[in-house]
């Protein structure tokens, strides 16, 4: 189910253009063998010519979480990168209404005592206007003129925060999303349930496939351990991976695939991830392993910070997830930067990639960012240079991934090295984290709260004792 808007991504060769004869029209008696050989030779030559005309793609940018009502200066840096493809990872606009954050009071929209929803959907007319506003940003318009733009959605452009298959307006919002992406009228995405699809770029030997997943349309409620993709989309994904002829297979998920961050911030914050559905996460790894596809790399968004994670215990080679979020929305904007960086340092980090290129010791980037892949096809050992870049285009996180390390091994069994009783770097999934890591943030917050209460109580007690002592002396 490949989709395209530009000639660069068309991978099928139309032999009708060359007026090749059909098998039935070839003479089969006097010159049958020669005709067959000539036919095969023509097919080979034309396929080689067709393949040579396909441009090599080596610069891909991606991002998520762009609020249409705030300035978007980051597009200038994206333009300077000169991507051949830009991939939206969701929250391409914010199309739902947001109530103020209140942990205490009659109407509590956040925290462990939350009693009303924080978000509510808007009308289709309002959603369409938000798309028009986001699409009219001058620098983004310039990017649309020079770069193929593809993408999927997440919850806020789907129509409602954290929504899944229960959202009633999903069919209508799908049409608006496809209009925003200038989806071709003959695309199957207009009629199918969900926005998943795939694209292929480049000639054989230097081919990239981008598989866009839809983690909203068919997703069961959070913590139900139900489905994320739905059976039709699982069938689609298995087919795309099994039949791929690409050297690099990028799987785009709007929510993090490998991160083990989401369970550790409860009950104070909520972060969606594949780890909320451990059976589906395991199925994803199993599908990749059985397909024998090489060069699989994940990209994701949603969380309002940049991060690179790696999982070594899923298939026969390491899996990477490059998370870019967000283009306008960033955790250090909504919270004090020192607090956000301390939280990033405090949280469990068994999947996170630490190296010399991290701008901060936590190897998390909490400011506005976008992601890039620079593929060096000319090197003897082809490399994928994955980066999270800041609003000026400077790398904040980086990982160099040799393509030779992302090769599936024929007949290799799944890599089941993880141990539930021991934390292993790049191996321990969120479902296997011990309780003292799952509740680390809660333990710290409640401990600080207890210390503050005790300090205030002791201070009041001392003041009362001092006051009563003075009164006693005066009475004497």
Image (cartoon, rainbow, N blue to C red):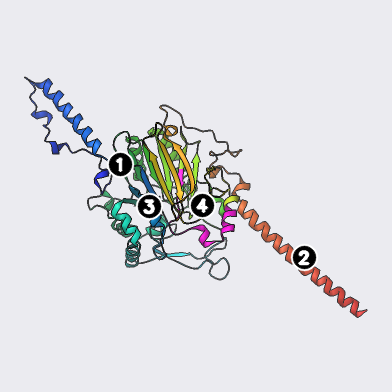
Q: Which residue is mark 2?
A: 458
Q: Earlier in the sequence, mark 4 or mark 3?
A: 3
Q: Label 3, on which residue?
A: 80
> Quick one: SS at disc 3?
helix
x, y percentage for residue 364? 53, 50
Q: Earlier in the sequence, mark 3 or mark 1?
A: 3
Residue 435 locus on image (x, y percent): 61, 47
Q: Residue at x 32, y 67 (%)?
A: 125
Are there few (<14), some (14-19), or many (20+) residues within 10 Å of tag 3? few
Q: Are marks 4 and 1 in contact (CB under 8 Å)?
A: no
The range drawn in magenta is 321-343
The residue carrying mark 1 is 201
Tell me the crowding category of disc 4: few under 14, some 14 to 19, or many 20 or more residues within 10 angstroms, Cα based.
many
**Which quadrant holds residue 10?**
top left
Q: Is residue 324 magenta?
A: yes
Q: Nearer the viewer, residue 126 or 41?
A: 41
Question: How far apart in space, not on screen, are marks 2 and 1 (Cα)?
Answer: 68 Å
What secondary structure is marked by label 4? loop
Which residue corresponds to mark 4?
Answer: 365
Q: CA distance from mark 4 to mark 1?
A: 30 Å
The reply to whether callout 2 and callout 1 are in contact (CB within 8 Å) is no
Q: CA distance from mark 2 to mark 3?
A: 59 Å
């Amino acid at each position: 189910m490949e989709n395209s808007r530009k000639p660069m991504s068309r991978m099928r060769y139309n032999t009708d253009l060359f007026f090749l004869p059909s098998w039935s029209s070839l003479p089969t008696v006097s010159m049958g063998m020669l005709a067959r050989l000539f036919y095969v030779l023509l097919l080979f030559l034309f396929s080689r010519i067709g393949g040579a005309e396909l441009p090599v793609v080596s610069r891909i940018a991606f991002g998520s979480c762009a609020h249409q009502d705030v300035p978007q200066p980051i597009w200038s840096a994206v333009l300077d990168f000169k991507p051949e493809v830009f991939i939206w990872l969701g929250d391409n606009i914010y199309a739902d209404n947001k109530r103020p954050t209140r942990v205490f009071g009659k109407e509590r929209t956040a925290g462990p005592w939350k009693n009303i929803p924080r978000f509510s959907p808007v009308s289709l007319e309002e959603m369409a206007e938000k798309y028009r506003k986001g699409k009219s940003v001058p620098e983004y318009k310039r990017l649309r003129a020079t770069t193929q733009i593809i993408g999927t959605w997440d919850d806020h452009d789907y129509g409602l925060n954290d929504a899944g298959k229960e959202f009633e307006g999903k069919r209508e919002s799908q049409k608006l999303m496809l209009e925003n992406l200038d989806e071709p009228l003959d695309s199957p995405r207009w009629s199918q349930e969900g926005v998943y699809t795939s694209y292929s770029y480049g000639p054989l030997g230097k081919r990239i496939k981008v598989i866009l997943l839809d983690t909203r349309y068919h997703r069961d409620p959070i913590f139900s351990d139900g489905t994320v993709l739905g059976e039709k989309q699982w069938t689609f994904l298995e087919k795309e991976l099994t039949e791929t002829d690409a050297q690099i297979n990028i799987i785009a998920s709007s929510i993090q695939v490998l991160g083990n961050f989401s369970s550790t911030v409860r009950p104070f914050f909520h972060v969606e991830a594949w780890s909320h559905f451990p059976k589906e996460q395991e199925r994803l790894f199993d599908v990749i392993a059985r397909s024998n596809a090489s060069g699989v790399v994940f990209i994701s968004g949603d969380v309002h910070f940049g991060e690179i994670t790696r999982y070594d215990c899923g298939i026969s080679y390491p899996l990477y997830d490059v998370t870019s979020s967000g283009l306008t929305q960033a955790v250090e904007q909504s919270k004090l930067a020192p607090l956000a960086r301390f939280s990033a340092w405090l949280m469990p980090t068994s999947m996170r990639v630490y190296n010399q290129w991290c701008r901060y010791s936590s190897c998390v980037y909490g400011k506005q960012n976008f992601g890039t892949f620079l593929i060096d096809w000319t090197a003897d050992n082809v490399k994928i240079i994955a980066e999270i870049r800041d609003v000026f285009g400077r790398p904040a996180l980086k990982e160099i991934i040799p393509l030779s390390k992302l090769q599936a091994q024929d007949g290799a069994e799944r890599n089941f090295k993880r141990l539930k009783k021991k934390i292993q770097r790049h191996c321990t999934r969120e479902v296997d984290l011990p309780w003292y890591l799952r509740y680390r943030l809660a333990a710290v917050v409640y401990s600080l709260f207890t210390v503050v209460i005790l300090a205030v109580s002791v201070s009041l007690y001392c003041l009362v004792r001092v006051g009563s002592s003075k009164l006693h002396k005066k009475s004497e």
